[in-house]
Image (cartoon, coloured by chain):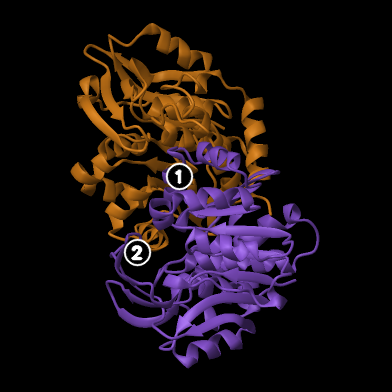
Chain colours: A orange, B purple
């Protein structure tokens, strides 16, 4: 089954202590779509400007991502620039140019509206609403977010959350949203807003699912070196949704394993700048790390 | 088989945002010994002053802890006082009075010297050496430490580490010791100092074992409320060693499960001030949380 993914399609200029990489393909939807594409067909919804390099269109196409929902409009592509500190944990935004995203209100292609799995990847909650409004009867809707929207569009976000089957956020966002320091107390409060499934991402410490069958503690894949963590959270949720869409049976039965696949694809994402590593992996490499995680957690 | 445990036997005065608890039974050896006692016989090595409350001696005895190696000397019991911030993660030491520990150089009772499992719980590395020197031919020696010894007794610690089968420390101590931000790169460097097994504790994010069979990612038990984390790391390594001592077969086969028991006893430790919760649990309650952790990690 296919996954519809809306989010940012951007150019990322990323500085780390060891390198500088201008105008990489980035954005939450790019990372999520490539990650999902290893498992299921993807319908991408996004917008880029006329400056968007054709090689990035080719990259999407090599991953068989459906681009009917990707608009190319006059103007500049969304451009984000950020800098990581030496430990790769602290990120500082240097520049955000929304470009064509500023006024983007897409009308979904008819062929997109029946997608059973919908991933509202990180983007303004207003745009997440707008896309969800056009979906016919999705089976499973998940949204991701970021601290920016908690700061400047909280009311939109609070209206979106009750419409979701699953909500994904990181630990500091969960604290900010609930004013709870304890992650399990925070999960309880977030469930009260509506979603049946809540996933809290903790970077190198893995992630935690809270759902009808209780908690699942999902490990991160051990990495000896993190080159660039940008997009890892998007890759996680993209692979998760792609794997869910390709699995038979109820979500409740499949979601733990789908998170493991998310964790593995996110680990590859961290091993290269932007999408450079993720676009080079194969399903066989993914399966090898999934087996690795099985071995690393059994007792 | 029995576990010899040396470490601090102290009185802890603990302030948290919600309460103040003076002169609780504390110290690394107290927490580790009570935790180990659920699984195996414990030989305790420590020293207290004449002000040590008799009810704490009774507490040790209720846990069938062998006290031949606990000296009661003229002077004051080691007294530590600390304060936790609202999120219970940041701890500030308000006062440390070494008291009788200042000049403590124990001679082990003959019956202690053949203990196959030795836990050098957190205490000055010089004292850890002194105790280890008196052991006949221990099967498995593990040491824990803290940032204080990295700061003031690093050379002693660096001489101790090669004598260990297992070394346990927390993530910030691992960074401090190796100058590596990446935890897996840090593990590699610590192995080079000698120990076959290295365990890095990450508080509520669980712990990581690196050993001959590779890594093991050990989860923390989910807690909705942490009352007082003091001693949780000591309880973790105490229960780990107690469980190892009671398990048949090679350490390599048993150590993952032993860490799970460590994680569970540490979770109980966090649910009360000092040892108040840990001393009330039963083996049945421990087994229930072990089963819980199995359910929380399977996929």
Do tag 2 and tag 1 residues touch (Cβ < 8 Å)?
no
Q: Quadrant of residue A81?
A: top left
Q: Is the residue at mark 2 from the same chain as the one at mark 1?
A: yes
As displayed, is residue B116 above or below residue B278? Answer: above
Residue at label 1? B177
- Chain letter of the residue beneath label 1 in the structure image: B
Residue at 39 percent across and 57 percent down: it is B148
Q: Quadrant of residue B69?
A: bottom right
Question: Residue A167 location in percent, x, y?
Answer: 40, 47
As displayed, is residue A254 above or below residue A112? Answer: below
- Local packing at callout 2 (Cα closer than 10 Å; few below 14, some 14-19, many 20+) is some
- Give the quarter of the figure containing the C terminus of chain A: bottom right
As displayed, is residue A72 above or below residue B104? Answer: above
Determine whether the residue tagged by mark 2 lies in a helix, strand or loop: loop
Residue at label 2? B88
Task: Please say whether residue A199 is visible from this viewpoint.
Answer: no
- Local packing at callout 1 (Cα closer than 10 Å; few below 14, some 14-19, many 20+) is some
| Horizontal arrangement in the rendering, residue A35 relative to residue B36 (left or right) | left
As displayed, is residue A272 above or below residue A235? Answer: above
In front of the other: A255 or A260: A260
- The residues bearing labels 2 and 1 have C-alpha atoms spaced at a distance of 24 Å
In front of the other: B235 or B270: B235
In front of the other: B157 or A208: B157
Which of marks 1 and 2 precedes in the sequence? 2
Which residue lies most toward the top here?
A: A54
Question: Residue A109 location in percent, x, y?
Answer: 39, 23
């Amino acid at each position: 089954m296919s996954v519809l993914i809306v989010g940012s399609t951007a150019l990322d200029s990323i500085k780390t202590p060891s390198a500088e990489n201008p105008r990489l393909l980035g954005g939450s939807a790019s990372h999520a779509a490539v990650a999902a594409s290893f498992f299921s067909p993807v319908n991408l919804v996004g917008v880029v400007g006329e400056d968007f390099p054709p090689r990035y269109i080719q990259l999407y196409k090599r991953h068989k991502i459906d681009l009917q929902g990707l608009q190319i409009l006059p103007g500049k592509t969304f451009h984000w620039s950020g800098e990581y500190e030496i430990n790769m944990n602290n990120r500082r935004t240097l520049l955000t140019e929304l470009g064509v995203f500023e006024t983007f209100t897409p009308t979904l292609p008819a062929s997109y509206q029946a997608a059973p799995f919908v991933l509202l990847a990180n983007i303004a909650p207003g745009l997440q609403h707008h896309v969800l409004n056009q979906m016919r009867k999705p089976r499973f809707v998940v949204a991701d977010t970021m601290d920016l929207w908690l700061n400047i569009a909280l009311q939109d976000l609070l209206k979106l959350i009750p419409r979701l089957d699953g909500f994904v956020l990181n630990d500091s966002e969960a604290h900010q949203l609930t004013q709870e320091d304890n992650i399990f107390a925070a999960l309880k409060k977030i469930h009260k807003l509506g979603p049946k499934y809540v996933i809290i991402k903790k970077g190198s410490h893995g992630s935690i699912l809270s759902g009808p069958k209780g908690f699942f503690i999902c490990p991160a894949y051990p990495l000896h070196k993190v080159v660039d963590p940008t997009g890892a959270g998007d890759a996680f949720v993209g692979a998760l949704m792609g794997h869910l869409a390709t699995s038979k049976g109820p979500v409740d039965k499949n979601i733990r394993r789908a998170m493991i696949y998310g964790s593995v694809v996110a680990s590859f994402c961290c091993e290269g700048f932007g999408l450079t590593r993720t676009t080079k992996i194969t399903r066989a490499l993914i399966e090898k790390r999934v087996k690795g995680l099985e071995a690393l957690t059994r007792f």
